[in-house]
Amino acid sequence: MNVLTIGAGSALLNSPFVFYIHFDAVTNQEVHVRLPKLIYEAYPVLYILGGITTMYLVGSTVAFCSGFLLGLSGTIILFLRRNYRAIRQHLYSY
């Protein structure tokens, strides 16, 4: 999945990188960032594993809560990506 913005061409869709654009607050200009797809797809899994590890290895309530929130955010990201891909596939299948 590629995150594209307005004006992105179809040539970017088959790229091995994930593209996204953000604005630099200092220079007030667009900054194009490329992440390899492997890293982009692994982030939510790493969040979940990091959260589980934090909850079980660190013995404090704050660590447990932060690990839970980290794991929850990874799970939410996975569900959002799955839903977006299903909707996108459905919309562009016609």
Image (cartoon, rainbow, N blue to C red):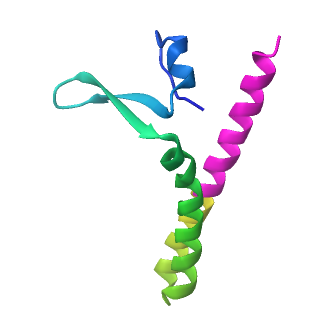
Q: How many marks?
A: 0
Q: Which residues are magenta?
A: 74-94
**Residue 11 screen position, x and y as percent:** 51, 15
Q: Nearer the viewer, residue 71 or 37?
A: 37
Q: Nearer the viewer, residue 90 or 37?
A: 37
Classify residue 56 by image quadrant.
bottom right
Instruction: Give the side of residue 36 with respect to residue 10, left or right.
Output: left
Q: Nearer the viewer, residue 55 or 31?
A: 31
Instruction: Give the side of residue 73 with respect to residue 83, left or right.
Output: left
**Residue 78 screen position, x and y as percent:** 66, 49
Residue lying at the far bottom of the rendered structure: 59
Residue at the image point whose x is 21% and y is 23% from the top:
28
Residue at the image point whose x is 48% and y is 33% from the top:
18
Above/below status of 51 relative to 33 = below
Above/below status of 31 relative to 61 = above
Residue at the image point whose x is 50% and y is 70% from the top:
66
Classify residue 91 by image quadrant.
top right
**Residue 22 screen position, x and y as percent:** 35, 29
Residue at the image point whose x is 75% and y is 15% from the top:
92
Above/below status of 90 relative to 34 = above
Whether the magenta-drawn stretch holds residue 20 is answered as no
Whether the magenta-drawn stretch holds residue 78 is answered as yes
The N terminus sits in image quarter: top right
The C terminus sits in image quarter: top right
**Residue 31 screen position, x and y as percent:** 29, 27
Name the chief secondary structure element in magenta: helix
Q: Nearer the viewer, residue 62 or 77?
A: 77
